[in-house]
Amino acid sequence: MNELAAVIPWLGTHKPRAARWVVIVLMITAPLIAAFFGRTWMRVLDFALLYVMLALGLNLVVGFAGLLDLGYIAFYAVGAYTWAFLASPHFGLHLPFWIVLPAGAAFAALAGLILGTPVLRLRGDYLAIVTLGFGEIVRIFMNNLNYPVNITNGPQGINALDPIIIFGWDISRNWQVTDNLSVNSLFFYYYAFLACVIGSVIFIQRMQVSRMGRAWAAIRDDDLAAKAIGINVRNVKLLAFSLGATFGGVAGGLFGAFQGFVSPESFSLMESIMVLAMVVFGGMGNLGGVIVGALILSFLPEVLRHHAVPLQQAVFGTVILDPEVLRLLIYALALILMMALRPAGLIPAHSRYSRPELLKAEPVPAEGRA
Amino acid sequence: METLLQQIVNGLVVGSVYSLVALGYTMVYGILGLINFAHGDVMMIGALVALQAILFAQKMWPSLGPLALVGIGLVVSIPTCMLLGYVVERTAYRRLRNAPRLAPLITAIGVSFLLQTLAMIIWGRGYHSFPQLISTVPMQPIEGVFVTPVQITTLLVSAGLMAALLLVVNKTPLGRAMRATAENHRVASLMGVDANKIIAITFIIGSALAAIAGVMVASNYGIAHYTMGFLPGLKAFTAAVLGGIGNIGGAMLGGIVLGLVESIGAGYIETWSFGFLNSSYQDIFAFIILGAVLIFRPTGLLGERVADRA
């Protein structure tokens, strides 16, 4: 929370306590503000929180441990499909969420462990390509495992997933306070997701300043030196990788419950790139940065959807780029331009946890690599 | 038996295309230590530009023969891709030469995504039918085994290109400079090699090969599409790892082996898995191979050219 408070311009640096209160008030009132603009924006807000969670998990892998994971969305898919298998009419199972959610997290962690074990003892680049392949494999299986035994229901996906039910209280139902006043279920989802995000942030923050967090920073900056001072590089990397996967699994389960429906389409490579763009854009290794990056990049497409078309019509007379294309362009350019101009991201991490030379974003002279 | 022979023929054709694309990956990796994710998309751009040129030529000079049309397609798309490869290297990768390892990788995936998006803007989301100028009427050299002229052309062209590349790399001053740069940038520059120029040339050669591969893939399947570069790119990288990344001969071998395994596997997977899996799982073979190579023989079949720290 302090990280987020520090992000606010001027107030963050001059009046940190006031800034913290601003953040808290914003967090609590955000759905009311969104509701003022319409129900779509409340949905967007809920999805934004899911993306924040994904970005936090990926940041653990990319930002803290310096491993590039390009198939991150596959773990999200594992979590979502676990929910679909264990809590939907598809197999007739309806387990409560406090079993399903940890199960999804555990499966995602297991997938991360299995995937990471052979790869992480090799140099880091291979992880990028293996995770890219893993994302593709998971998609192939999701699409094709409906024959001869129907497991995933193929490209149609699985419908009617159970909502989150806390002590018999179904949070996907609108709450009828009086006859003409009802509280939309999107509010409840917002606060449920917010609780998860806050829990994750606290956990990750403690992790970052722990012995393990320092070990991650060490292998990110120089894994040879880290090995020399006695860090078990492979295990530490493996922990970061599967912990990141766990967050993906939890977010996936929540996504499944929220959406009530899963299909392979939601877990394309593009989604992985999107989450990566959020982390890179916000600032690798900095929690506040990652959260802000995820929020900006998940709201921007929605803003574009509403304003890009009229704007282009006003300026050029016709619609040149439809909002969907514009969104893809923004993600691609966010990755390339951030790396070229501001590699530490919008809000760079504290130098204590990052490479100090990354903070100076001046272009490096082109010269041979040693 | 016919099935096996047929799958071997198919595998050789697919494999030779993988080899061509894998060469681009392996040369860049050998020199820069960078996985150039955008390479597969350069191939896609090559195919789509060639398609555009061929359609244009067909409209302008309807009397042209099919070979001339393919020639025009290649003449337009090869330089376009060379330019593209150069521009990508110059604008995106060169400034990151000394940055931490993660930065160029992230840029590479960004460039790949950008190229796909641009192709989508220019050519749309739909599938384009690629004119099958070289005949696809199958011949039967052996009873029950079908080979099309376009497959034979693909095999011959890629064999010729690979031989030419080997000659250039092993016998010319340019090739010597490339090998020296791959071995050690700094020392190569001390010996008077302009490392930046060599790196740019490597990108240009790789992109030219990718353009040709793109035209071959598109004319084999008769389809061009803005995501057609992703999966072949991934598989070609697998081929490069399989052969030993950084090793040019390895990339060729790896491509052929991967193509063979994939098509033989796709032909028999239904029998092997007792009908549980079908040929829509063809694509997982590449990843199984990738996993197996990384576990059991990370240096690849022929060994890496440049040993790197773990």
Image (cartoon, coloured by chain):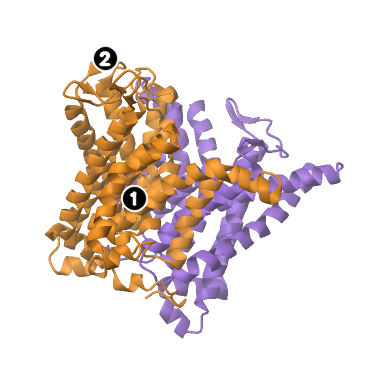
Label 2 – label 1 distance at C-alpha: 34 Å
Q: Which colour is chain B painted? A: purple
Task: For mark 2, give the secondary structure.
Answer: loop
Labels in figure, total: 2
Q: Which residue is mark 1?
A: A69
Q: Indicate the chain on which mark 2 is placed.
A: A
Q: Residue at x 50, y 50 (%)?
A: B113
The mark that comes first in sequence, 2 or 1, is 1
Q: Residue at x 26, y 14 (%)?
A: A92
Q: Which residue is mark 2?
A: A92
| Residue type, mark 2 in image | Gly
* For residue B235, side relative to residue A208 (left or right): right
* For residue A318, side relative to residue A50 (left or right): right
Residue B219, horizontal then vertical, whole percent: 65, 40
Residue B228, horizontal then vertical, whole percent: 55, 42
Q: Residue at x 22, y 37 (%)?
A: A105
Q: Residue at x 32, y 51 (%)?
A: A291
